[in-house]
Image: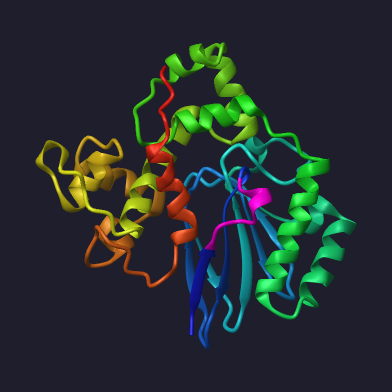
Amino acid sequence: MDSYVERPPSPGLAGVVRTVWIQRTGAAPYVQRHLPTGGVEIHFPIGGRPQLVGPLTGPVVEVLPAHTTIVGVRFHPGTAPPLPTVLDDLVNQRLGLGDLWRSSADRLVEAMALAGTPERALAFLQAHLLQEFRTRVHVDPLMGEAVTALMPWQPVNIDALAAHLALSPSQLRRRCLQAVGMSPKVLQRTLRFQGFLALAQAGAAATGRRGADGMAGLAIDVGYADQAHLSRECLRLTGLTPRQLLGVNADRCACDHDHSGSYLPFLASRSRQPLRV
């Protein structure tokens, strides 16, 4: 039986990792649609070769073999494990961790294969990442502030954000491309759609702003002009309409996967004090 369960990361990684997960495929291959999230991901098949998935700007469809177990890590935009290049070079790319981490990746693959259970393998992977972030990775705090400001819960003008960060618009764009892999505007659009998905996956009710409820209401709540605007962005980012992506009830997630580890912290950002720019 296919299953997919997201969880919050270990406390030490909460500032850089959005969610971790374990996915199991059943007796038949499983068609997985990867969507843009604004961040990079590690996909680690137990007993197989791990990959780093760079920031996506559109959907990527992958067929997972039957009887496969994958543990995964999804990073916040602007954070990533040790890499030999800037994220702008990794957009829409899948790279073997062995090509990036060399011998340390081989040791990690062996240890993960001997972990015994996916849960223990995931714990081992997180412990490895925690050590890497403590010793080798520098996270740009200015880009962290920019990413927070670009969350979907309040509209932010990109030029005003640059001025708030004491950067020119071109400097903000360059630093965002290097640290995130996409321009501030593309990231803002990606996070806005992630906000809609989070609301839908959580089964949230629309606030009724401008008299809209259901899917149209959720679209307005995250900053779309209307439902048609949402549909155009959904097609661009996922290759599907909202109804095709989420199922018959398009304001609810119908995929039977547990996404709570991803959407709960995302939705928690709604209550934080917005950045005044």
Q: Position of residue 111 (x, y in %)?
A: 82, 70
**Residue 54 located left or right of residue 31:** right
From the viewer's perspective, is residue 42 above or below residue 170?
below
Tell me where residue 22 sits by quadrant.
Answer: bottom right
Tell me where residue 120 sits by quadrant.
Answer: bottom right
**Residue 178 located left or right of residue 257:** right
Along the line of sight, which residue is nearer the eye, 128 or 105? Answer: 128
Q: Position of residue 26 (x, y in %)?
A: 52, 84
Q: Residue furthest bottom?
A: 27
Residue at left 89%, top 58%?
Answer: 103
Residue at left 66%, top 73%?
Answer: 119
Q: Residue furthest right?
A: 103
From the viewer's perspective, is residue 81 above or below residue 200?
above
**Residue 246 located left or right of residue 56:** left
Q: Is residue 12 magenta?
A: yes
Residue at left 56%, top 45%?
Answer: 39
**Residue 167 located left or right of residue 234:** right
Q: Which residues are magenta?
A: 7-14
Q: Is residue 229 magenta?
A: no
Q: Position of residue 8 (x, y in %)?
A: 55, 57
Q: Position of residue 236 (x, y in %)?
A: 37, 46
Along the line of sight, which residue is nearer the eye, 151 or 1? Answer: 151
Along the line of sight, which residue is nearer the eye, 190 or 139? Answer: 139
Is residue 92 visible from the viewing direction of this image? yes
From the viewer's perspective, is residue 180 above or below residue 67?
above
Number of numbered tags placed on the structure image: 0
Residue at left 55%, top 11%?
Answer: 168
